Image (cartoon, rainbow, N blue to C red):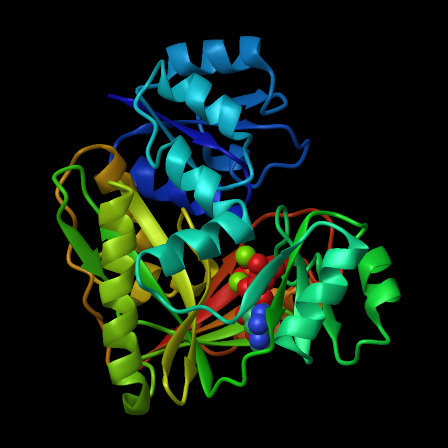
Amino acid sequence: GSTIGILGGGQLGRMLALAAANMGYRVHIFAPETELPAADVSAAVTRAAYTDHAALEAFAAAVDVVTVEFENVDAESLAFLEARVPTRPGARALRIAQDRLVEKDFFTGLGGRAAPYRAVSSRAELETAVREIGTPGILKTRRFGYDGKGQVRIDADTMLDAAWTDIGENPSIYEGFVRFDAEFSILLARATDGSSAVYQAPRNTHANGILVLSEIPAPAALSAHIEAAAAMARKVADALDYVGLLTLEFFACADGPVFNEMAPRVHNSGHWTIEGAHTSQFENHIRAICGLPLGETGLSAHAVRMKNLIGEDANDWAAILADPRAHLHLYGKSEVKPGRKMGHVTWLE
Ligand code: ATP
Ligand code: MG
Ligand code: MG
């Protein structure tokens, strides 16, 4: 059998590894952290920094294909791997998706629409950006943000000093605050032959920048938004000659969908596909990177709901299981921390 190498060892890697195991593949995890939810269910683990070229060299020799469950791997390291072993998605997709400025330039360059944004690399540039775009807005670090970390909302131009300090004076973008009716995501799988398939788009609800709920199908009022957004997602995937699962997040606004960000990987808003779609996002990612045909993405139920278990939520698992139709997923993380994603629950109707 073949071995799949995964960069990153969190819950996304864990669910990818489980899907890979179902299909007879071995998984080799490469990640620096001591606690790795993905390592528990994988055949091999390399604990090393993403910049450790000797470790990357050995990893490349030990696997047949490389993929990512975490997009913040140095582009240099990805290129290093790409020169040695098929790497899907490739360095170009990661380089774009790991930088909010590059990502928004790329998306709008393809004809898509994002909230107004400006690059901010100094206090003076923040001043200019806020003057041009106005308030309210959000200052976001270009790199390394997730679950709303690395973001500051700006409601008045008296807040600039504090915001610039809060963001650690890091290279950032300032974007206008979007008054959206709803948020949704497009989950698209693309195979090596260029064929692609989208899932039913979930409607996503966030609290404090963290996804709490995905509901499928999204309300009918979002259909036109979703269709336009899915066409853009296809355009993005084709432009990158992308292989694997790609996620794009959107805001539904009065005048159409507004792009928020993309992730070159399986996504939290796609966890419902494990039970709720004919083929899960994890299986389709594995199929795609292994050069296999994609599986059917349609719903396997009338409606699906996925709720994240964040921090203390997970302690309630006995109560969750009191509902015999709840599909409980726990990621095996030892330490409960506020805001940490510990697991999720899916319900089918
Ligand atoms: P993720 O965990 O999804 O990667 P992230 O840290 O990259 O999160 P974003 O997706 O940029 O953060 O923002 C998190 C949430 O904050 C969004 O889903 C949305 O609810 C809200 N948000 C972000 N940007 C804007 C905006 N410009 N206008 C209004 N709301 C926003
Ligand atoms: Mg993000
Ligand atoms: Mg997001």
> Within the displayed image, which quadrant is ligand 2 positioned in?
bottom right
Foreground residue, 199 or 274? 199
Residue 190 left/right relative to 204: left
Q: Is residue 256 above or below residue 25?
A: below
Residue at screen point 45% across, 68% down: 114
Place of residue 175 in the rendered image (x, y in percent of width and height, measured from the top left):
60, 68
Foreground residue, 163 or 148? 163
Circle count: 0
Please identify the quarter of the rendering in which residue 63 is found.
top left
Residue 271 appearing in the image: no
Foreground residue, 311 or 242? 242
Place of residue 146 in the rendered image (x, y in percent of width and height, measured from the top left):
61, 55
Residue 224 appearing in the image: yes
Residue 217 left/right relative to 205: left
Residue 155 left/right relative to 132: right
Placement of the N terminus among the 4 image quadrants:
top left
Placement of the C terminus among the 4 image quadrants:
bottom left
Q: Is residue 189 above or below residue 276?
A: above
Residue at screen point 17% across, 52% down: 196
Residue at screen point 37% across, 86% down: 255
